[in-house]
Image: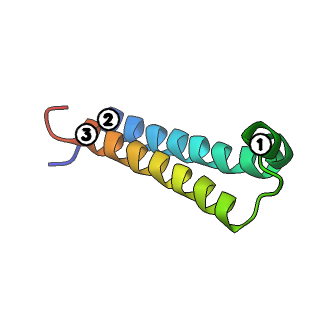
Amino acid sequence: MGRPCGLLFRGLADAALRVFAMSGQVLYGRLGAEIVRRKMGWTEIGESETAQISRVIADNLDAMLAQARASAAPGA
């Protein structure tokens, strides 16, 4: 039998908020690139810096997905 409607809605709302949170990270990186560059002490955002940024965003996504899976597990 499926999940009750309230739990399903909560799951969809949580998923939407996770998408907004991840989009916010990427958007800040794009709009705030100059601030990020200065605060990190980088002279440019080249391939190495882009790889570092991508790794951190991927790690954050992995953590968000792990938390989502844990909270969706039976008995959570």
Element under label 2? helix
Q: Which of the labelled discs sits on residue 70, or is there none?
A: 3
Q: Quadrant of residue 40?
A: top right
Q: Nearer the viewer, mark 1 or mark 3?
A: 1
Q: Do the residues under discs 1 and 3 have CB atoms within 8 angstroms?
A: no
Which is more toward the observer, 76 or 46?
Answer: 46
Element under label 1? loop
Which is more toward the observer, 9 or 27?
Answer: 27
The outermost residue toward the bottom is 47
- Residue type (three-letter) at the residue carrying disc 3: Ala
User: Crowding at label 3, few (<14), some or many (≥20) Cα neighbours within 10 Å?
Assistant: few
Q: CA distance from mark 1 to mark 3?
A: 37 Å
Q: CA distance from mark 2 to mark 1?
A: 45 Å
- Which residue bears the numbered disc 2? 7
User: What residue is drawn where x is 14% and y is 48%?
Assistant: 1
User: What residue is drawn where x is 67% and y is 43%?
Assistant: 24
The location of residue 55, given as percent across then percent down, is 52, 56
User: Crowding at label 2, few (<14), some or many (≥20) Cα neighbours within 10 Å?
Assistant: few
On the rendered image, what quadrant is the C terminus found in? top left
Element under label 3? helix
Reply above or below: 21 against 59. above
Q: Earlier in the sequence, mark 3 or mark 2?
A: 2
Would residue 22 appear left or right of 38 to someone viewing this image? left
Reply above or below: 12 against 58. above
- Which residue bears the numbered disc 1? 41
